[in-house]
Image (cartoon, rainbow, N blue to C red):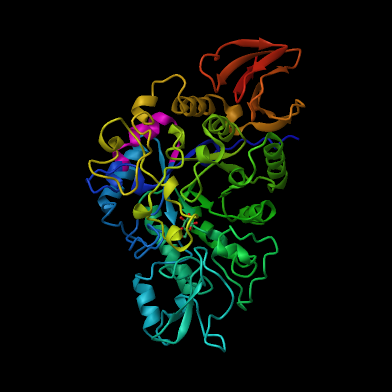
Amino acid sequence: MSGSVCSPSVWWKSGTVYQVYPRSFQDANGDGIGDLRGITSRLDYIAWLGVDALWISPIYPSPMADFGYDVADYCGIDPIFGTLEDFDVLVAEAHRRRLKVILDFVPNHSSIAHPWFAEARASRKNPRRDWYIWRDPAPDGGPPNNWLSNFGGPAWTLDETTGQYYYHAFLREQPDLNWRNPAVRAAMHDVLRFWLERGVDGFRVDVIWHLIKDEGFRDNPENPDFLPHQPEINRFAQVYSADRPEVFEVIAGMRQVLAPYGDRVLIGEIYLPMERLVAYYGSDLDCADLPFNFQLIQTPWRADAVVDLVENYEAALPPGGWPNWVLGNHDQPRIAARIGLPQARIAAMLLLTLRGTPTLYYGDEIGLDHVSVPPERVQDPWERNEPGHGRDPERTPMQWDAGPYAGFSTVEPWLPLSADAAARNVDEMCDAADSILTLYRRLLGLRREHAALSVGSYRTVGLGVEEIYAYERCEGEATIRVILNFGGGAHDLPLPEASTWTVLLSSRAGRAGAREAGSVALGPAEGLILLRG
Ligand code: GLC
């Protein structure tokens, strides 16, 4: 099938996003934790890599119960990360390098330490009481309904002073705000404006599908597919606690705040099945510009499964809805850990040649793998609540060079480095023809060079080989064919008779520039990008 041909004019359609987990990018002040001045000092690297925007996970004042996803002040910077002045410098320096800056916005819940919550819990009559979600105990004194926390255990905590339960979709230190209250919406809109005025280019909105809960607080139904090794949250289908119809009005409200500021982007974090995910573009494309598409993380790594996924996604997109793709983030095992390093190279080629805005996760470009974290160094609260589900292994420091602590810090970092840090680092890999870093950089270069790759149409090419996925991207006269080997076989694959093709890039060094006609050889776990003519 062919995707619609668009002529995107805005940067976030043709551009690529790079996620920086700020605790782990670069430590400038020698405390073992990354910070804003550290990120600024690495902007040259980000620009050199060839991405267009950086999204920074939360940097606001926070007790760090969930490492910044528990916000105590939406308009400040945590001293661990620096100051507002450091932030302004970062934005200015990024813009000087033509890099956009996207902030993480965490509107579903604040920290328990936010002054709003202190007021809300002071008494039932406090004017801010209704800024959060309070319910009376069930008749037996237990929680008001069966909703569970995403990090395990009940989603309700009894506030002894006022005798009511408050709701928290995540930790008890992260009480959910009541987005049905217009005063909450107004306050949060002011937060967005505060950062827009400081020059940010958009927001990645945390758990956007959670913002509105069922008005009647009905029990969630049991999930018949629940398996015992899964996190406890999966025991019930989240029918009433999230993805409620009224959420779209709330998101459209955020979009209206961004509108007068021009081409700022609104990205929504959404873990939902495809047909629900695409609803978050809004009925009139008035909600999220990019509802994050995590389907590549959730789909088995097989050519047939990925072809189906891409076709289903292309077909499900609303007219004018711009696609996007994500391979990894701070909540998911590293791509190299999921599919192995050879296939992680193929995944990079896929991510950067599919139709839609790609988001790269820092460290994937150097092939960071699962990093083992010994029990005494565990940081993630989820790992403490539900062992085995923690996210520390994908949040370890970026590795810059072969020096002490891989150039990340001058002291022992908050999470360990990978065992192969002396070789797996930017310095060692940036000039190596066959490194995954070089592959990423070439891919990003090709995307900029060839409009077909960034904004061209998409068409699956059926080659009838089970482990091969091929497709074409076209724009104007240009046709680019991508052929990816998801398996270990070698193949000789036919090319359309009438044309010759130039190899733009192979996942193996040394083939670029070769001309192919009639057929092309593809090695085990090799990916090829060919330009017609
Ligand atoms: C999002 C974040 C995750 C965080 C959770 C609660 O899923 O990506 O890291 O723990 O929201 O804010």
Q: Position of residue 479 (x, y in %)?
A: 66, 22
Q: Is residue 306 left or right of residue 109?
A: right
Span highlighted in magenta in the image: 39-53
In the displayed structure image, the side of residue 395 where residue 327 appears, left or right: right
Residue 71 is situated, as x and y percent measured from the top left of the image, at: 38, 63
The N terminus - image quarter: top right
Q: Return the x and y of residue 434 as percentages of the image width and height.
A: 47, 21
Residue 13 appears in view: yes
* Residue 86 is one of the magenta-drawn residues: no
Q: Is residue 441 left or right of residue 60?
A: right
In front of the other: 259 or 419: 419
Query: Is the residue 67 above or below the residue 220 in the image?
Result: above
Does residue 291 appear left or right of residue 400 in this picture? right
> Measured along the vertical axis of the image, is residue 388 above or below residue 401?
below
When asked about the image quadrant of residue 48, the answer is: top left
Tell me which residue sits at (40%, 63%) in the image: 70
Say which of 35 and 395 sits in front.
395
> What residue do we see at 65% from left, 52% from top?
278
Q: Quadrant of the C terminus?
A: top right
Most common SS among magenta residues: helix
